[in-house]
Amino acid sequence: MNLIVFDLEWNQCPSGKDHEIKKLPFEIIEIGAVKINEKKEVLDTFHALIRPAVYHRLHKKTSEVISLTMEQLKDQGVPFPEAAKAFLDWCGTDVRFCTWGTLDLTELQRNLIWYGMGALLPGPVIYEDVQKLFALTYENRKVRRALNWAVAFLQLPEDREYHDAIDDAVYTARILQLIPDGIIYGNYSIDSYQNPKSRAEEIRIRYGTYEKFISREFDTKEEAMADGNVSAVRCFSCHKNVRRVVRWFVTGSHNYVAVGKCEAHGFVKSKVRLRKTEDGKVYAIKTTKMISSGDMEKIRGKQSKLRLKRYLKRKK
């Protein structure tokens, strides 16, 4: 299996968010990629400029970041369908995508679907988030660094530009070459922009210290939270459903937390994030892990504070 390290540059509506096309807020204008094998040897590179067809002026922020001009894109670029097909043909079949962060793969799928090409990259898509892998290897798991910060930290040669698709892809590939295989293949990510549509397509993955579950679609968040697969709290160690000692409560507009207790293995925390699809449906991403009794008490205390806050608000 080859690894495809790619980076995208995109433009957005120059007139502001109120005037953007909701199904295509970001139009891809450049694709850069590096193909490396399982030994992390560079096999080939890919680069394409794309002629804009949706937004015909560069957004101010885009023009401040990238070195390309609209004139260059119009003169040297090719239509997105042509560039995307060439890119995916170049990638081949037995591959895994690698990106710096979580955005590029989502926007690639969104642009493909806009042009009726979604079948070329069906989801959900397994990929490697090199930004996350860098954090797991060199820093705290939750820290997320900018690409140039990571390059400087690793003392890699800064012989290319930043915010250029092919150059950023090369920098990302160089970082990936320094990450151990065990970290790479044991901590893969899933892009759920094309989310599961049925119970049979639901995803459950176990990592070293936690489990992730991605549900099918529901009409409402209430329906999602009532589903047994979403609301159940399972012990990470023995996989059994456990009794909830902290019932599900809302920590944000789309986030829920509960704690269960396994008599054999201790306390288990489950966190659900509800995501909306572009057609208004809802699906859940649930993570589950073992926690200490101290962490359980902190969560219980947070639940009590939120309940008191809501009570006082109703009394006003």
Image (spheres, rainbow, N blue to C red):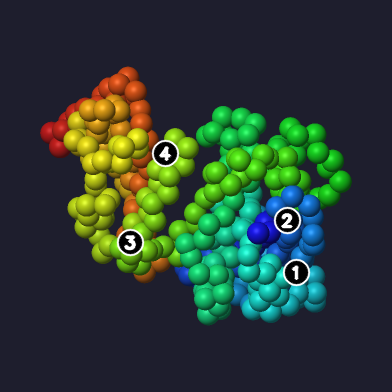
> Which image quadrant for residue 256?
top left
Q: Nearer the viewer, mark 3 or mark 2?
A: 2
Label 1: which secondary element: strand
Q: Residue at x 52, y 76 (%)?
A: 119
Disc 2 packing (10 Å; few <14; some 14–19; many ≥20): some
Dot 3 amino acid type:
Arg
Residue at mark 4 to residue at mark 2: CA–CA distance: 29 Å
Work out whether mark 3 precedes mark 2 in sequence or the reverse, and give the earlier one: 2
Q: Is residue 10 left or right of residue 288?
A: right
Q: Nearer the viewer, mark 4 or mark 2?
A: 2
Q: Which residue is mark 1?
A: 48
Q: Nearer the viewer, mark 1 or mark 3?
A: 3
Image disc number at residue 216: 3
Left or right: residue 53 compared with residue 45: left
Q: CA distance from mark 3 to mark 2?
A: 34 Å
Number of residues whose C-alpha sits closer than 10 Å to that of mark 4, classed few (under 14), some (14–19) or many (20 or more): some
| Kind of element beneath mark 3 | loop
Callout in the foreground (3, 4): 4
Pointer 4 residue: 210
Instruction: Say what amino acid the circle numbered 2 marks.
Output: Asn
Please give the name of the residue rendered at 35% of the width and 67% of the height, measured from the top-left corner: 197
Residue 75 or residue 103, whichever sits in front? 103
In the image, residue 241 sits, relative to residue 222, either above or below, namely: above
In the image, 286: left or right of 122?
Answer: left
Q: Quadrant of residue 138?
A: top right
Q: Position of residue 192 (x, y in %)?
A: 45, 58
Looking at the image, is mark 1 or mark 2 earlier in the sequence?
Answer: 2
Please state, as top left, top right, bottom left or bottom right, where the N terminus lies in the image: bottom right
The residue where tag 2 is placed is 37
Q: Secondary structure at mark 2?
A: loop
